[in-house]
Amino acid sequence: MKSQVVMWTAIIALGVFAVSCGRANEEVGAPADTATASRIETFTFGSSDTEVEAKIFLPANYEADRNLPAIFLIDYTEQHFKLATDEFEKVIEGTQRVSGLDALVITLAVTPNVDAEPDTFHEHYELFRSLTSHVHGRYTNNPARTFIGKGSESGVVLMALLIEDAETSLFHNFIATDPSAMYSSAVIEMLEDEEFPADKMNKKLHFSFSTSNDREQCRALIDLIEGAQYPWLTFEAVEYSETDYETTYPISYADGIQFVFGR
């Protein structure tokens, strides 16, 4: 517990530093005096008696429409692959590739240097529950939320899909790419043992993996989901056979956003 407090204290300190350096209101693709320009803002929210910094992308249409869907990116520092540092930007780009789609994109302002493993799932999930609660009503009234992530974080996305029920539902759409072997095993076990609530409604899942992943394990997970034919789930699975972990996520993020928003 003490190490977690130290970790989040460091994250918060870095977030405050980022804001003080002028990241609180960044224009995206337009001059600063353009009122309708898309922009990135930072804000603080509370979670488990801790103040945490987050950032949000607001599209140009935001001022005219406060009922836009929100996409929540779970992005932690890669423990084995260090090159993917632009996930937030790639999610934004993914929304812009879908004709007619305006969406908010939200993530933590500072990328935590932690490893998301199944035994700490609830810690990460509760953090994003707090984040979504803060965003809803302040930035949008749209209840359609998307949870997106890659690597170990995509395991958090998959687990969130399974543990939510109709009463506690937080997210509607789920985009998971290249989950870790540990998380894939945990999800497969839950599917095989049916150890999750069955009272769900209108969920969408885009699941994908690349050549870097364990193909047999990922195919086993896909087969379990497709074989079950859950009435509450619209499912798409993609194997990216020509790209690896470092090059797949920009493609899979865009493909997943296209799938869940159906445009």
Image (cartoon, rainbow, N blue to C red):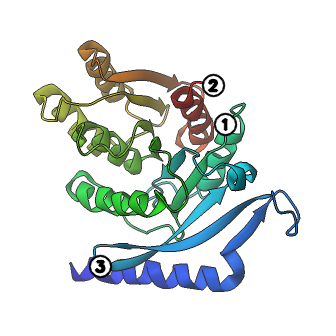
In the picture provided, is 171 more to the left or to the right than 58?
Answer: left
Q: Residue at x 30, y 29 (%)?
A: 201
Q: Quadrant of the C terminus?
A: top right
Residue with the mark numbered 3: 49
**Spot occupied by residue 49 in the image (x, y as percentages of width and height):** 29, 79
Q: Which quadrant of the figure has residue 223? A: top left
Q: Where 107 falls versus 246 (above or below)?
A: below
Residue with the mark numbered 1: 101
Q: Nearer the viewer, residue 180 or 206?
A: 206
Q: Where 231 falls versus 34 (above or below)?
A: above
**Spot occupied by residue 67 in the image (x, y as percentages of width and height):** 57, 47
Say whether disc 1 or disc 3 marks the residue closer to the N-terminus.
3
Tag 1 near tag 2, CB within 8 Å: yes
Residue with the mark numbered 2: 263
Amino acid type, callout 2:
Arg
- For numbered disc 3, what is the local secondary structure? loop
In the picture provided, is 192 more to the left or to the right than 12?
Answer: left
Q: Nearer the viewer, residue 136 or 179?
A: 136
Q: Few, some or many C-alpha atoms within 10 Å of disc 3 (few <14, some 14-19, many ≥20)?
A: few
Q: Nearer the viewer, residue 247 or 118?
A: 118
Say whether disc 2 or disc 3 marks the residue closer to the N-terminus.
3
Residue 115 visible in rendering: no
Q: Residue at x 55, y 37 (%)?
A: 244
Tag 1 near tag 3, CB within 8 Å: no
Q: Residue at x 26, y 20 (%)?
A: 224
Amino acid type, callout 3:
Asp
